[in-house]
């Protein structure tokens, strides 16, 4: 066992020397693994008004952008198969958000793109229409610009209004 540990340490030390990083070690002489730390994320937001009732706007956005309700995710988690549990784990990695108060408010969100960004949509009743509040989170400052998000924000409005299906 000591021989295996020695070989493993040599391989690890070689990898560290190539990477040019020093690693701290635990009592066994093996490098300590640190959890992955996500980069700080900034956000930008956009407010939209749409002439559509809150339930219809939310249903359109949920369907088009494939947001998943908590009940749908729990249904997958509760299946007995390994593939269902793997599917649920993959969905949870997307950091899904869902809350609803039918007739007045919906909140939905998930990771966006390569998985580093995150979008949250809140749809509120606003008289006969609805108010859509979009929040976009990213650690990449270029992803928070109008040039990057302008088309997405316009598309969200068009989807909520039923112009894009």
Image (tube, grey):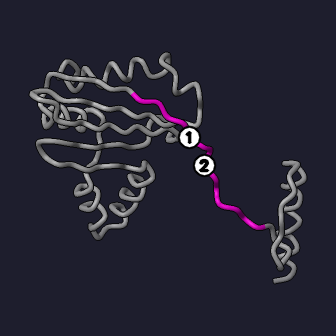
User: Mark 1 to mark 2: distance in Å?
Assistant: 8 Å
Q: Residue furthest front?
A: 127
Q: Is residue 53 visible?
A: yes
Q: Is residue 76 above or below residue 63?
A: below
The quadrant in which the N terminus is found is bottom right
Q: Is residue 46 above or below residue 139?
A: above
Asked whether the residues under the numbered discs 1 and 2 touch, taking CB atoms below 8 Å apart as contact, a structural biologist would say: yes
Residue placed at 29% from the left, 70% from the top? 80
Q: Residue 14 lies in what quarter of the image?
A: bottom right
Image spot of residue 148 (x, y percent): 49, 21
Foreground residue among 33 and 47? 47
Residue at figure coordinates x 35%, y 32% from the top left: 134
| Residue segment shown in magenta | 32-45
Q: Residues within 10 Å of mark 2 (few under 14, many from 20)?
A: few
The disc label shown at residue 139, or none: none
Number of numbered discs overlaid on the protein picture: 2
Residue ID for mark 2: 38
Of helix, strand and loop, which mostly describes the magenta segment? loop
Left or right? Give the position of 41 relative to 24. left
Residue farthest bottom in this picture: 1
Q: Nearer the viewer, residue 56 or 133?
A: 133
Magenta-span inclusion, residue 21 = no
| Side of 73 relative to 126 (left or right) | right
For numbered disc 2, what is the local secondary structure?
A: loop
Q: Is residue 18 above or below residue 61?
A: below
15 relative position to 74: left or right: right
Residue designated by label 1: 41
Q: Nearer the viewer, residue 18 or 108?
A: 108
On the question of residue 4 being in view, the answer is no
Residue at x 21%, y 27% (from the top left corner): 160
């Amino acid at each position: 066992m000591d021989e295996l540990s020695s070989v493993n340490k040599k391989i690890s030390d070689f990898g560290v020397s190539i990477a040019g990083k020093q690693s701290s070690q635990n009592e066994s002489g093996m490098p300590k693994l640190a959890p992955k730390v996500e980069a700080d994320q900034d956000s930008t937001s956009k407010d939209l008004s749409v002439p559509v009732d809150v339930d219809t706007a939310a249903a359109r956005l949920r369907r088009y952008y494939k947001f998943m309700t908590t009940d749908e995710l729990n249904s997958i988690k509760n299946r007995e198969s390994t593939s269902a549990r793997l599917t649920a784990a993959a969905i949870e990695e997307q950091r899904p958000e869902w809350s609803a108060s039918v007739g007045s408010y919906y909140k939905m969100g998930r990771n966006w793109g390569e998985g580093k960004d995150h979008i949250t949509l809140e749809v509120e009743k606003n008289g006969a229409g609805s108010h859509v509040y979009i929040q976009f989170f990213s650690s990449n400052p270029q992803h928070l610009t109008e040039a990057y998000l302008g088309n997405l924000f316009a598309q969200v409005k068009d989807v909520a209004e039923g112009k894009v299906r």
